[in-house]
Image (spheres, rainbow, N blue to C red):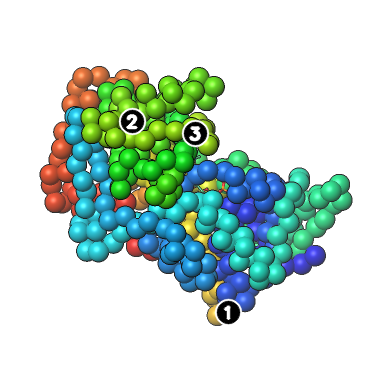
């Protein structure tokens, strides 16, 4: 088998890259370890930047999104017993965010790929990457017990944090920057109307909470939990009680609760591997970097990486210039680090740390009070939340 770009991973990064390259006439094969249904069952992100939506529009995969999404002009911050609205649209001269689940983005991209007749191998086991230091890389995998090899010009490692691509690079060639946080997020999805029309980010003495949504009838809520906690410790009743404890009185009184349809715990981590290119192997999305979800940036960074990478490969194939691929890592990392900073800052401001004492709790409140009262601070937060320009 031969293709121009072998893509490892059918998450949002790999699938969007596949559609962008297809639109430039560049041939791809995607290798995915899991089944299609498994990938579609992972409940993750819900907030898309305008740039991400723009890329989905560019590849013609935004019709259902525009029919079903919710456009949000602002978010609320809850602390000290009351809620404060940040009007991001006003603060950014008209920019907004789009609420549409990552599962739906993935489904739309998978359907478009299938309709275009592009090759995706699900349940590709033992994927291994070879010879990306030279000009003729190869990818091997097994499927149903048989071994296969793909010869290609480039490999795109879009296989997430635990994928094989970054692990295929010599450790000495990588510089790792990392911070783990001493807590996780317990998330619940429920078939209930959202408590409020916009997202609520909560700083509370009992810990962080977030009220989000997927639609007008489906809510997504999170509470900060212990890192060693387990979903079995959190029957639905206990989850709703804990969430209500952390909400303001109005939200706690009006929230509609119901059975959870998904419940999971995610650890929080900041992580960057530099560089993002090794010869003819490129890393994109969670394969190269992780942000804590507090800034809603992970999926959006996967999209911006893929924007830079697809343009670089278009320049290589169509304009016969290597300038874009040579500059990919630098360009992508410049934006990645700004999102890392924003996500770290949101996390630090909103969570209870084991060493949060009375002084640091007051500093968090002072920061939040400043943020909602100062035009400059509101603008700085808003331009990051809606997404910095590409
Ligand atoms: P993915 O989605 O992890 O996809 C990688 C794919 O690669 C496959 N794979 C392999 N395939 C072949 N061979 C191997 N050896 C392989 N190893 C792995 C995997 O099966 C998978 O299908 O990475 P990608 O595409 O880079 O996308 C990244 C996003 O999924 C991630 O950043 C976001 O979900 C993060 N995130 C959020 N991002 C946002 O932009 N906005 C949000 O509101 C938001 N909320 C969140 C989040 C992540 C969360 N969790 C669970 C960590 C909320 C949560 C709770
Ligand atoms: C979500 O809806 O899952 C979500 C929204 C905003 C975040 C993180 C997760 O910051």
Kindly identify which residue carries mark 3.
260
Q: Earlier in the sequence, mark 2 or mark 3?
A: 2
Looking at the rendering, in which quadrant would you find the N terminus? Answer: bottom right
Residue that appears at 65% across and 45% down: 38
The disc, 1 or 3, on the residue closer to the chain's N-terminal end is 3
Q: Which of the pair 267/207 is nearer the observer?
A: 207
Q: Give the crowd class for mark 3: few <14, some 14-19, many >=20 residues within 10 Å.
A: some
Asked if ligand 1 lies within 8 A of label 1, the reply is: no
Label number found at residue 208: 2
Local crowd at mark 1 within 10 Å, few (<14), some, or many (≥20)? Answer: few
Q: Secondary structure at mark 3?
A: strand
Of marks 1 and 3, the one in the foreground? 3
Return the x and y of residue 331 as percentages of the image width and height: 43, 60
CB atoms of marks 1 and 3 within 8 Å: no
Position above or below: 356 against 60: above
**Which residue is denoted by mark 1 in the rendering?**
318
């Amino acid at each position: 088998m031969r293709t121009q770009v072998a893509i490892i991973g059918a998450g949002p990064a790999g699938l969007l890259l596949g559609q962008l390259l297809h639109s430039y006439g560049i041939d791809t094969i995607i290798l995915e370890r899991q089944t299609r249904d498994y990938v579609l069952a992972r409940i993750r992100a819900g907030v898309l930047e305008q740039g991400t939506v723009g890329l989905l529009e560019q590849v013609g995969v935004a019709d259902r999104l525009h029919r079903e999404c919710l456009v949000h002009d602002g978010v609320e911050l809850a602390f000290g017993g009351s809620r404060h609205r940040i009007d991001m649209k006003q603060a950014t001269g008209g920019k907004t965010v789009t609420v549409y689940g990552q599962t739906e983005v993935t489904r739309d991209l998978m359907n478009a790929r299938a309709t275009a007749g592009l090759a995706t191998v699900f349940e590709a086991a033992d994927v291994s990457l070879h010879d990306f230091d030279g000009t003729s890389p190869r990818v091997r995998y097994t499927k149903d017990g048989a071994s296969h090899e793909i010869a290609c010009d480039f490999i795109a490692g879009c296989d997430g944090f635990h994928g094989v691509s970054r692990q295929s690079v010599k450790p000495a060639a990588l510089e790792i920057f990392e911070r783990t946080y001493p807590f996780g997020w317990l998330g619940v999805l429920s078939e209930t109307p959202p408590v409020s029309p916009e997202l609520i980010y909560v700083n509370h003495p009992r810990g962080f909470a977030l009220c989000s949504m997927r639609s007008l009838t489906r809510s997504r809520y999170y509470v900060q939990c212990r890192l060693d906690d387990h979903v079995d410790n959190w029957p639905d009743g206990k989850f709703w009680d804990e969430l209500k404890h952390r909400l303001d009185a109005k939200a706690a009184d009006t929230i509609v609760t119901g059975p959870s349809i998904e419940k999971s715990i995610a650890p929080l981590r900041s992580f960057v591997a530099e560089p993002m290119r090794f010869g003819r192997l490129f890393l994109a999305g969670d394969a190269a970097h992780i942000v804590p979800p507090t800034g809603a940036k992970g999926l959006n960074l996967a999209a911006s990486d893929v924007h830079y990478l697809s343009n670089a490969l278009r320049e290589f194939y169509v304009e016969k210039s290597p300038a874009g691929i040579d500059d990919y890592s630098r360009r992508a990392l410049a934006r990645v680090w700004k999102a890392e900073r924003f996500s770290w800052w949101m996390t630090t401001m909103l969570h209870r740390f084991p060493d949060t004492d009375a002084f640091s709790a007051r500093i968090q409140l002072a920061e939040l009070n400043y943020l909602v009262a100062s035009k400059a601070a509101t603008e700085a937060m808003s331009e990051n939340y809606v997404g910095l320009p590409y």
